[in-house]
Image (cartoon, helix red, strand yellow):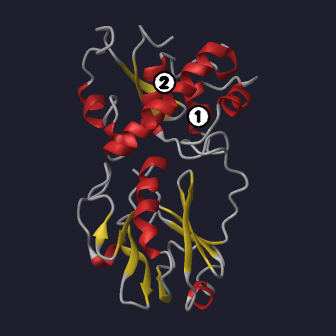
Amino acid sequence: MPEGLEVEIYRRAAEPLIGREIARIEVDERVAAPGVLDRIDDELRGGTVLSARRLGKQLLLDTDGPTLGVHFGMTGRIVVDDVAAIDQLEYGSGRDEPRWDRFRITLADGGSMRVNDPRRWSRVTLDPDISGLGPDLLEVTYDQLRIAVSGRSRPIKALLLDQHVVAGLGNLCVDEVLWHARIAPAHPAGELTGGEVAALHRCMRQHLPVMLDRGGSHRGEVSPAFRAALPSCPQDGAALVRETVGGRTTVWCPVHQV
């Protein structure tokens, strides 16, 4: 599913839109945010794309009019000029059916950007309010992370999944960084030592960019195949545990994660 890493891949794929004129907008009413359907074509048509940004899981296309916000839900994929940035999502169908196109920008030069989503969980909005989101998963600082966990009784995994705390982290990325940082997912966030917070921040800075370069959140050590097989922990040989933490399926090692 699109976590912040996948949306960063989508952002990079959207960069060729910069400087191009929008000729037409088409949007499925089921993915349009309230009040957007009647405005979006009128307000974006004839405009020029100025930049492609991202915060967390939100893609932001700035134009000389409104900013277009796209959230991809679980199965949304971006296709720019008929090239898919990601061929297949972990929970996607692997097919690109025209009837699943939920949003399309047609450009004046004949190119296009579209969001293909079989489940219709993507959301499109104008001038989205992103003020409530936390710092981005690829940019969060140690001090921001330390302040975020301070005094919190919630399990660290549940806290990291909160987009108001760190924007862009999803289930796979959180399990990955906690596994490398040697921190149990159910550990109360406020009880982490300064050294543990530093280790968590260091692992985020080290491992998330590697996963991004490999192709996304499913390319870590705690990959979907690893989670399904549940082998012995490669760090210490212990039996791994699969359980629910923070409402999400969690895989972790009870020996080196404490």
Mark 2, other Cα within 10 Å: few <14 / some 14–19 / many ≥20: many
Q: Position of residue 178 (x, y in %)?
A: 48, 24
Residue at disc 2, secondary structure: helix
Q: Crowdedness of circle 1 by 10 Å Cα count: few (<14), some, many (20+)? A: many
**Image coordinates for residue 198, horizontal then vertical, percent:** 60, 21
Location of residue 210 with respect to 147 vertically, above or below: below
Left of 22 or right of it: where is 149? Answer: right
Identity, as a three-letter code, of the amino acid under mark 2: Leu
The residue tagged 1 is 160
Q: Is residue 250 above or below residue 218?
A: above
Name the outermost residue toward the front.
Answer: 19
Image position, residue 161 (x, y; %): 56, 38
- Amino acid beneath label 1: Leu
Query: Along the line of sight, which residue is nearer the eye, 202 or 45?
Result: 202
Give yes or no for contact between labels 2 and 1 (Cβ–Cβ under 8 Å). Answer: yes
Image spot of residue 224 (x, y percent): 30, 36
**197 versus 101 height, above or below:** above
Q: Quadrant of residue 137?
A: top right
Pointer 2 residue: 178
Residue 175 visible, this angle: no
Q: How many marks?
A: 2
Q: Is residue 150 visible?
A: yes
- Left or right: 54 as drawn, with respect to 7: right
Give the residue at x 73% y 55%: 131
Q: Earlier in the sequence, mark 2 or mark 1?
A: 1
